[in-house]
Amino acid sequence: MGWRLVTATPLELNMNCRITENEIQEFMREFADDLESQEMLRLLRLLGRHPYTRFSRSALAESLDMKPRDIDRTISRLKAKGLLCTVEGKETALYALTDNESWRRLITKTAALDFRQLAMLEGRLI
């Protein structure tokens, strides 16, 4: 049960998602430049796997094994891009994936890629 990447054709993903390789590549190019961008991509992939979950800052930092200042910077950058929203909790702020449906769909489909698919796409971006 293999798959093959072909530019501008649908890429079969787990969970019966369909997305073109070009869409994923353009999305990932935005976040593939430097360490900070890669941290944003890691956070987006986590949120994409749990699109309706709200996370505290400490839960995000622990899940991604990031220092508090690094998670704060990453959260700020994603909020500035409109990809992350803040929901006020009882005692602390909670963070969730954007409500923008087209971004949410792209992020969740990208998060559905397995390690091999993601590595192949990342390799093609270089």
Image (cartoon, rainbow, N blue to C red):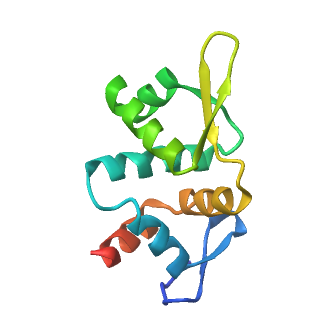
Q: Residue 6 at x, y = what percent?
A: 49, 90
Q: Residue at (34%, 31%) from the top-left corner?
A: 66
Q: Residue 96 at x, y = what percent?
A: 63, 37
Splitting the image into 4 quarters, where does residue 47 fall?
Answer: top right
User: Is residue 94 toward the left or the right of residue 33 in the image?
Assistant: right
Q: Residue 94 at x, y = what percent?
A: 62, 26
User: Is residue 54 toward the left or the right of residue 80 in the image?
Assistant: right
Picture quarter with the N terminus: bottom right
Picture quarter with the C terminus: bottom left
Labels in figure, total: 0
Residue reaching furthest to the top = 91
Residue reaching furthest to the front = 80
Q: Residue at (45%, 37%) from the top-left corner?
A: 76
Q: Is residue 89 above or below residue 109?
A: above
Q: Is residue 67 visible?
A: no
Q: Residue 11 at x, y = what percent?
A: 58, 79
User: Is residue 78 toward the left or the right of residue 55 in the image?
Assistant: left
Q: Residue at (40%, 73%) from the top-left corner?
A: 121
User: Is residue 8 toward the left or the right of residue 25 in the image?
Assistant: right
Q: Nearer the viewer, residue 23 or 18?
A: 23
Q: Is residue 123 above or below residue 31?
A: below
Q: Residue at (42%, 28%) from the top-left corner?
A: 61
Q: Is residue 17 above or below residue 43?
A: below
Q: Is residue 51 visible?
A: yes
Splitting the image into 4 quarters, where does residue 51 fall?
Answer: top right
Q: Nearer the viewer, residue 18 or 34?
A: 34
